[in-house]
Image (cartoon, helix red, strand yellow):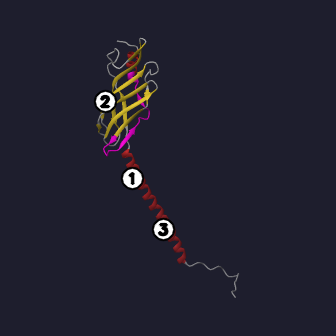
Amino acid sequence: MNVIDLDRPAAVPPARSRRSHVLVASALVIGAVVGAAVTYGWSARRQAADQDRQVSVFVFAESSQFLGGLPAGSVVLDGRVATVTLTRRVTLVNAGPRPINIRDLSGSRPGVSVHGVDKQRWVAPGATVQADADVQVDCVHGLPLGRLPVTLSVRTSDDEDHEARPRDGFDSTPWSEQAEAACAGEA
């Protein structure tokens, strides 16, 4: 039979067990810090690798002299110009971190379509190239020209195919006056 003396103070745990609690707590804190550092490093490396794989291209419509007259490929119905196809220049800027081959450019909205490039063009990071684009305009529904959603087919130096789309679309406004004059049949 065990007797419990309630008047006696509780026994104080030995110092050794307090020390083990401190060691366990220290090990947990050190583990958390090391784990956070490893996770941050992995995340930063992955983010840098993702950024290196991104493709970024700017597309600008180049304003050029319009000679007037009805362009080849235009359609005239009942004495009125229905559609015109203009060949114009675009400037392509590689804003990404590695060389790219811009293989194709296409875009459309009701009444307007743009197709161009269609040949091999390796562009170094930060460099620009110029290409021709065919702009087909429905004279009734396509004017005035403005922003067009475009897609670029791009291949990177590691032979991966990508599609790039300018965030705000492609501003074809510099061609609007020329398209309007062609639709009016002005010489």
Which circle's residue, 2 or 1, is located before the other in the chain? 1
Compare marks 1 and 3 and give the one earlier in the sequence: 3
Which quarter of the picture shows residue 157?
top left
Residue beneath label 3, please? 27
Q: Position of residue 185 (x, y in %)?
A: 38, 13
C-alpha distance separating marks 1 and 3: 27 Å
- Residue in view at x 46 percent, y 18 percent: 140
Q: Amino acid at mark 1?
A: Arg
- What is the C-alpha distance between the residues marked 2 and 1? 36 Å
Q: Residue furthest front?
A: 78
Q: CA distance from mark 3 to mark 2?
A: 63 Å
Name the quadrant of the N terminus: bottom right
Q: Which residue is disc 1 drawn over?
A: 45
Q: Secondary structure at mark 1?
A: helix
Mark closest to the chain's N terminus, 3 or 2: 3
Tag 1: Cα neighbours inside 10 Å, few (<14), some, or many (≥20)?
A: few
The residue type indicated by label 2 comes to Ala
